[in-house]
Amino acid sequence: MTTASSDIIASDGPVVPSAMWRNLSARPRPTKLPKGLDAAWNRAVSWLVPLVPRQRRFMRLAHQVVALEGEYTNLSEARLREAAMLMRERFRLGRETDEDLIRAFAIVREAAWRLLEMKPYPVQIAAAMAMDAGIICEMATGEGKTLAATLPATISGWRGRGCHVVTVNDYLAARDAEWMMPLYKFCGLRVSPVTGEMTPPQRREAYACDITYTTNKEVAADLLRDRLAMGQRTGLPRMLLSKLIDGHTGGADRLVMRGLEHAIVDEADSILVDEAVTPLIISGHAPNAQQTEAFEEAAQLAVQLKAKEHYDVNHRFREIKFTRAGRAKLNELTEDMSGIWKGVRRREELVNQALTARELYSLDKQYVIQEGKIVIVDEFTGRLMPDRTWRDGMHQAVEAKEGVEVTPPKDTLARISFQRFFRLYRKLSGMTGTAYESRFELWRVYRIPVVRVPTNRPCIRTQQPTRMFGNADSKWRHIVEQIREVNETGRPLLVGTRSVRASEHLSGMLTELGLQHQVLNAVRHEEEAKIVAQAGQRGHITVATNMAGRGTDIKLGRAVAEEGGLCVIATERHESGRIDRQLYGRAARQGDPGSAASYLAIEDEVIQRYASKWIKLILARQRGRDGQLVNPIYRRLAEQAQLRAQRMATRQRHAVLKADDWFDEFLGFAGAEG
């Protein structure tokens, strides 16, 4: 495949896309992690795949599409619709040629201009072709990923086997489906979103459409529910055979999905990489009064133990380990207790969980309390997740710690990792603003290459040097001073924080100075999108978690460009450098001016948690020092801590994959998958 690709690039004649489309879109994905020599080969190939020069190839094809513009511009609406229906028929019957594919993109492009008043740029067409070929394309923030996705989605819809456009939240799924519906209807396709509040009949109807917009959590959960409905029958053919033999539907009437053909994943790095650390679990209620009471008792026991004397805290690996004195103290405290507390291993597990909740789970960081309930805050987006709970009793341990009603633990009915789920699709592609850093992992796990698509207009963002401080107080003072100075010029500011607590802290400091601002932390998606959309207006100050409003364009207000455009300030490094780059990318979209700055302190969590011992020894000499640390070596040491965090996250995702394979092999959860 590499040789063929090189030959196409070197050719002076017309670009022939057929081999590219067939080779990439039909590429098989592994159902399990490779082992031994296969794993070594997979790793070696992952380093070679990015070397294939794909960008110029897709840009050439995009210009061929643009060259056909004259043939369709002068057509009447009826004639253009007739051309679209003819293409739909050819794709549905599988009779399309290479030229048909180019013309299909040209037809959809012209229809988008007439119905949506948006005509895809060549770079958007190149991205669309990459996605139709089964590739993840990196498009800069503000380059029009939503519109670009309509082209490959339409082609997949014409093929008649369904297409799922997967995004990060219900609001974006519903918004994009409604926004692009006129284009899809013109092309003879049905489209519908699948959101959390929909009933099974509504979901079944939505999945039966040609194109379905949904979230990764909803579509994966629906797959698990369908598997539970099938019971021992591991496929639809067996269910239909059972119906013919004994007359029973075998649960077929309860299925909502019709298969996994093609997924176009928006914000692919977030969904395929960041959120892949935690598997999706379908659970059922299992009331156990004795176990619920045990969590409350464990929380009371944990308060009587002292850090370093009775237990050690490993912040990097988020672990609690008892010391010898701690075990002796626990034995003493539970000597007169009965029941579950007589078992040494079980009581240590319960108290260990209680200590983990106490030391490593913080209010307004990992969770908030709403209406007397613990609600998880998504680590990567800062959004609330009221429908999710921590597993293995951790949620109950946090509830007991905070003194709220302890909910009964739940039994696991079905589980699947997002890595495994997305590898079930026959074709998988996506788009995001930051994928290049994860190009090796995306190939090793999903067999998907990454291509960078150039911006439509040159990016003129000013990236200011990272500023490092000896303590957090000094860092926050300089951030507030910078906000005040920029605000006086009239430029809008978007300030990114890592946690709810940090955003509230900064908000309080801005309020003391009398600076009007908006705070976004774990709010409803629709409100979030509206606030972020206004963040580019003159004089606006928006304090938000790093990923707030992802998927929403920030357009500059009147005269803002003349003042220098949007100013983005990152108040702390994230575990993943991609998320920092996403935040920076909110400034200077589509050729607009803008700037980005980053402020760090030695006391920041990423540095303290992930830096190696020798780096901590170097930084310890400057910790607590007031003012900026000008020596660039400190910034490089902070970058090393972030790289270490990224490597650990990769290992965690690998562990989730291995656990998935183990469950499949030894517990027979998923059954055979073809």
Image (spheres, grey):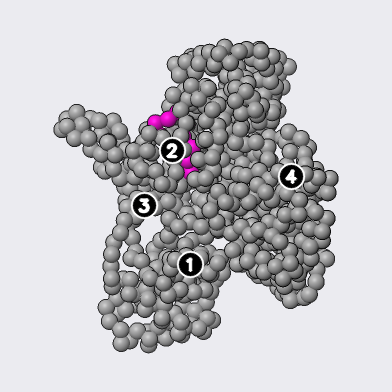
Whether the residues at callouts 4 and 3 have beta carbons within 8 Å, the answer is no
Q: Which residue is mark 4?
A: 556
Viewer-side residue, 136 vs 587: 587
Circle 3 SS class: strand
Q: Amino acid at mark 1?
A: Ile
Viewer-side residue, 422 vs 476: 476
Mark 3 or mark 1: name the one nearer the start of the chain: 3
Using the image, tell me which numbered label, if any, was put on residue 356. none
Q: Which residue is mark 3?
A: 282
- Lateral position of residue 256 relative to residue 383, left or right: left
Look at discs 2 and 4 and give the one toward the viewer: 4
Q: Where is 179 relative to 18, above or below?
A: below
State how far apart marks 2 and 3 are (Cα): 18 Å
Magenta span of residues: 207-215
Mark 4 or mark 1: name the one nearer the start of the chain: 1
State how far apart marks 2 and 4 are (Cα): 41 Å
Circle 1 SS class: strand
Q: Which residue is mark 1?
A: 369
Residue 426: image location, x then y, percent: 46, 32
Mark 4 or mark 3: name the one nearer the start of the chain: 3
Look at discs 2 and 3 and give the one toward the viewer: 3
